[in-house]
Amino acid sequence: MSNDINELTDSASAGKATMEKITSLAKRRGFVFQSSEIYGGQSGAWDYGPLGVELKNRIAAVWRKEMTQLQDDIVGLDSAILMHPRVWEASGHVENFTDPLVDCKKCKTRFRSDQIPEDKLAAKICPECGGELTDTRKFNLMFRTSIGAVEEEGNTIYLRPETAQGIYVNYKNIIQSNRMKIPFGIAQIGKAFRNEIVTKNFIFRTCEFEQMEMQFFVKPGTDEQWFNEWKKRRWAFYEKLGVNTNNLRWHQHGKDELAHYAKDAYDIEYLFPMGWKELEGVHNRSDYDLTRHAQFSGKDLQYIEQETNERYTPYIIETSAGLTRTLLMLLCDAYDEETVTEKGSSGNTAEETRTVLRFHPLIAPITVAVLPLMKKDGLAELAQEIKNELREDFSADYDQSGAIGRRYRRQDEAGTPFCVTVDYESKEDNTVTLRFRDSMEQVRVNRTELCARLHEEIKSYKRI
Ligand code: GAP
């Protein structure tokens, strides 16, 4: 292997991800745009551009594979966002899914009362303008609308605040249709909506977002063992994706933090630019959910063990990750800046900083970019041909504009792990240059072996 025209000089100078840099890169390269931007923007909502939607779909695909294809006993589901309103009474969301809020009577700003200084809250003084604050009241986070032609009492319907309930109400259907035996799981990815008051930090906390949730149904008494098992499996998922584990940690919920349904709960936290924050929750939900749905629906949701005829209400171990929050985490984790020296066409070297997203190739929006060294002499046509071959297996891009170094930089910034350069030698001996994003090393590969080589590189990828 040889180094390309660029050489790493000072890995220690690597720049840190800040939320400003991430937000700006996300917009510049078409990962994420503000919703309704031309109208001044809609807070709490974001649009995923061409690279963002690829990244999101790939994260979802990797999660789905991990949680269904690679497991013996987990099946998928895609339940509706709109559900019977009684679901949310049974789940406890109508009563308990609230934030404590205060409003300023003068500047009208709304605050979560647990996020303003205690002395100001006690004295009822607005931390923004010094005006008088209202008493704390409970504010339900569910979006409420009405269904049908007439907007009246009884037509109320909610946008689901979590995907989990769609799983619980289908638990019996899935046991019957798919002959599932406990222990087994149901996994689903989908949109969720919460009327969040504080939506700063880009896509970290939004009103519309996506979740990747798995509910694992177990026999009471085995729940603690399964809880520990799922903690291990979920941590291993992030390791597999090459996430820097120094930036991950566990946080166990204290008694005052536990949700109304939880017997025990741990968050996997990530060190985001704004500090340690929740990425995913692993919860022991006990038999709360199925007991409540049995009560509210009047249906028997007990499980009967065929061998022993024993009846019980299963306990549920939940793994609940935000898809859009995972995307933000992976952008932050992949972000790197490093100083490299580049040889110009005159042979002189110059130092510059490259921005690179070190995505695992499995989630990179573009897997391989094909670049003709020159547009002329048939190189562009040959490169197009190679791109067309590769796109059967990979997400492949083609770029012929600008100096080759510049094109590499553009791909580095988009997180493309492999570039294939087509030059004059390619016309003669059917070889191309394969360039690796992380090391910037280059190797010569026969065109006929390129596809297999890329598959191998993806399989054996280790982040450096
Ligand atoms: N079913 C359990 C549940 O929904 P949660 O802790 O409220 O638990 C799970 O949410 C995950 O969903 C969080 O760890 C986070 O990744 C994501 N999430 C929650 N609220 C979010 C929001 N407003 N914006 C983006 N992601 C959110």
Image (cartoon, grey):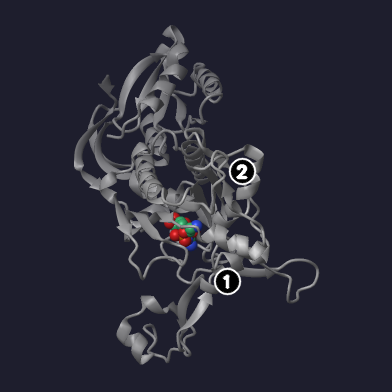
Q: Nearer the viewer, mark 2 or mark 1?
A: 2
Q: Residues within 10 Å of mark 1 (few under 14, many from 20)?
A: some
Nearer-the-camera pick, 163 or 101: 163
Task: Identify residue for label 2.
Answer: 175
- Above or below residue 33? Residue 404 is above
Is 394 left, or right, of 360 in this rendering? right
Q: Is mark 2 within 8 Å of ligand 1?
A: no
Q: Is residue 87 above or below residue 345?
A: below
Three-letter code for the amino acid on which mark 1 is drawn: Val
Looking at marks 2 and 1 on the same chain, the residue that comes earlier in the sequence is marked by: 1
Q: Which residue is mark 1?
A: 94
Q: Position of residue 54 (x, y in %)?
A: 52, 41
Q: How many marks?
A: 2
- In which quadrant is the N terminus drawn? top left
Give x and y (percent) for residue 389: 54, 20
Q: Is residue 159 visible?
A: no
Pick the front one: 228 or 426: 228
| Residue that sits furthest to the right in the current view | 149
Which residue type does callout 2 highlight? Ile
- Circle 1 sits in a helix, a strand or a loop, which is it? helix
The residue positioned farthest toward the top in the image shown: 429
Res. 176 visible in picture: yes
* Kind of element beneath mark 2: helix
Residue 224 spot, x, y in % from top left: 37, 51
Quarter of the rendering containing residue 36: bottom right
Residue occupying the point 44% across, 37% down: 364
- Residue at point 74% right, 66% down? 147
